[in-house]
Amino acid sequence: MTGDNLPAVLVTLVGARRVLMVDPSTSEPARRAAAAVGPQGSVVVLVRDGAAGWSDGVEVVVGDPVESLPHLRTDDDTTFGVVTVDVTRASVEDALQYVEWALVLGRPGTALVVGGSGDAFTAVRGALDRHPRIDAASWDTGDSALAVAVLTDQR
């Protein structure tokens, strides 16, 4: 069993129509998420480099994810129901920004998944545990770790 289907499962669990994926290591989870949201939904993927190999139904934004995130805000308050973040290649500062942007671009009930290892993941795990608008659980998966959270409406 792999985690490739986790975003698609979360789409079904929370009834998401929009999915945001920050710096995923492969295109397979995006392909599966696109199938889960269907033609009326959308999947936006932020990648540092390269746009090849992504499936139809996936909008790929190439560039620094921290710089790309502010451009995803919309005037109509459209939010993402699922946000996934891979902090494997992120600095601590960038990883923490990804979490803050998940709060801006999400809504109460948005599912947030963060995977990775090292200092960036440790910092994110601490931020998730302390944030009043996030309920989270995390665990080590061997070489890396995973956190699954839900955004709440508490302020």
Image (tube, rainbow, N blue to C red):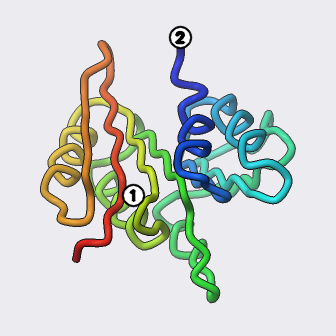
Label 2 element class: loop
Q: Please tell me which residue is depicted at 60% across the width and 48% down the height of the picture.
A: 47
Give amino acid for label 2.
Answer: Met
Q: Please tell me which residue is depicted at 59% across the width and 75% down the height of the picture.
A: 71
Q: Please tell me which residue is depicted at 34% across the width and 65% down the height of the picture.
A: 100
Quadrant in which residue 88 is drawn: top left
Give amino acid for label 1.
Answer: Tyr
Label 1 packing within 10 angstroms: few (<14), some (14-19), many (20+): many
Image location of residue 95, percent across then percent down: 33, 51
Q: Which residue is mark 1?
A: 98
Q: Is residue 50 left or right of residue 69?
A: right
Label 1 element class: helix
Q: Give the camera-side residue of 136 and 93.
A: 136
Image location of residue 26, percent across then percent down: 62, 29
Q: Give the camera-side residue of 145 and 53.
A: 145
Q: Which residue is mark 2?
A: 1
Q: CA distance from mark 2 to mark 1?
A: 27 Å
Quarter of the figure that contains the C terminus: bottom left
